[in-house]
Amino acid sequence: MTFVEKYRVKSFSDVKGQDFAIEKLRFFFKSFSGDGKKALILYGPAGTGKTSLAHALSKEVNAEIMEINSSDLRNADQIDKVVRPASEQRSLFNTNKVILVDEVDGIATRDRGGLSALLDIIKTSSVPIIMTANDIWDKKFAQLRQVSEVVPVKQLNYKTIFYLLKDIVIKEKLNVDDESLLRVAIKCNGDVRAGLNDLDVIKEEGEVKALSLNLLNRDEKKDIFTILKEVFKNRFSNDIIRIFDKTDMSLDEILLWLEENIPYEYKDEELWRAFDALSKADVFKGRIIRRQYWRFLVYQNFFLSAGVSAAKLKPKFGFTSYKKPSRILKTWIINQKNAKRKSVVLKYCAFNHISYRKANRDFSMIVNVFKLPEVQKELKFSPEEIKYVSSFGSS
């Protein structure tokens, strides 16, 4: 049995660092009725315990839990066949019943009417429906968010993960020193499941050095919520300048997220200092577009990362619910441009056998090469992609 299975939380008392989510789950179940919202979405990065929280709730309220993974629901017919009967019938053996739809964002990836069918079921359900998702902010989930309570499940900090893993190391009598365990906790990037998997490696191999490759290959990409937290809350350090290298988002998108959420974190002097940094980043963005001075990207990045982070007078603590940018139209336009950019970069990556992240980061320096007809022909660009690269950088 793996440590993930063996140490799966059995009650809310086993859950660390998720007090806000626990409170929301309890209130949702207690206040469930035919009039209010009938579904709740737990969203957050992988390995933060979203599924475990749902199971912990079912045990606390003595509810039968019916768990369904989105990978088993390929279309509207299957959702209607599996989920609807469960939503209409009370439990035969327990007082209460809960339906858990795991990884609901996977339904939309191959959606054949599945999302619409799920929405219809939620509206008429007689039992609470809990859904989990890594990213629920795509526009295709707008209606799902409207009919559901949306609750963030935050990444745990490395100290909390360290003590969780330390407790297991002691119980399992594993030979792991604190320095190595701390390295594991930091490399987890808030993913408890990854830490437990690392302990499995130690148990199987019998030595800590077996972890080296496991840690080296771990994906360190971060979602926008984690990045915002590090920029807004952490003490300023030189590492913050490179924080945006850990996301595939463009600086234009990041600027919108910062602009929307600065007022939730900063007040008074901090507020104007942060917006001053944001305005300087925007100035350099304009110079890049007008004059094609791509070397100014480093300044745009600096003011968005270090400039906004250094605006605070001291580190911030506590949970902040970050909001999606309200300038939806502008975000949509950026997304359309990014879709074309992504398709161009992917073709370039496949041809040259390099990583997407590196190619995307260097895009502004190589885009002029893409304007050459022979290159466009070699990479088999579509007319839309040719139009995009040809107009790139035009004012």
Image (cartoon, rainbow, N blue to C red):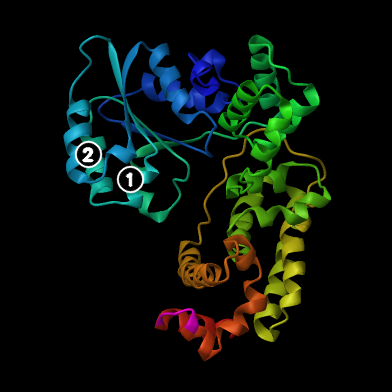
Q: Position of residue 289 (x, y in %)?
A: 65, 80
Asked if the stretch drawn in magenta spans residue 69, the answer is: no
Q: Which mark is residue 107?
A: 1
**Observer-nearest residue: 382 or 323?**
382
Name the residue at the bottom extreme.
373
Q: Secondary structure at mark 2?
A: helix
193 w.r.t. 133: above or below: above
* Residue 362 sits above or below residue 371 on the image: above
Residue 249: quarter of image: bottom right
Give how far across and how far down residue 390 sits, in percent: 53, 86
Q: Which residues are magenta?
A: 378-382
- Percent across and percent down for residue 135 are 47, 45
- The reply to whether residue 145 is visible in this rendering is no
Amino acid carrying mark 2 in the image: Ile
Most frequent secondary structure within the magenta stretch: loop
Tell me which residue sits at (46%, 79%) in the image: 385
Q: Residue at x 53, y 81 (%)?
A: 389
The image quarter containing residue 205 is top right
The first of marks 1 and 2 along the sequence is 2
Disc count in the image?
2
State whether residue 107 appears in this view: yes
211 lies left or right of 351: right
Q: Quadrant of residue 258?
A: bottom right
Q: Amino acid at mark 1?
A: Ile
Q: Are marks 1 and 2 in contact (CB under 8 Å)?
A: yes
Q: Which residue matches tag 2?
A: 79
Secondary structure under the numbered disc 1 in the rendered image: helix
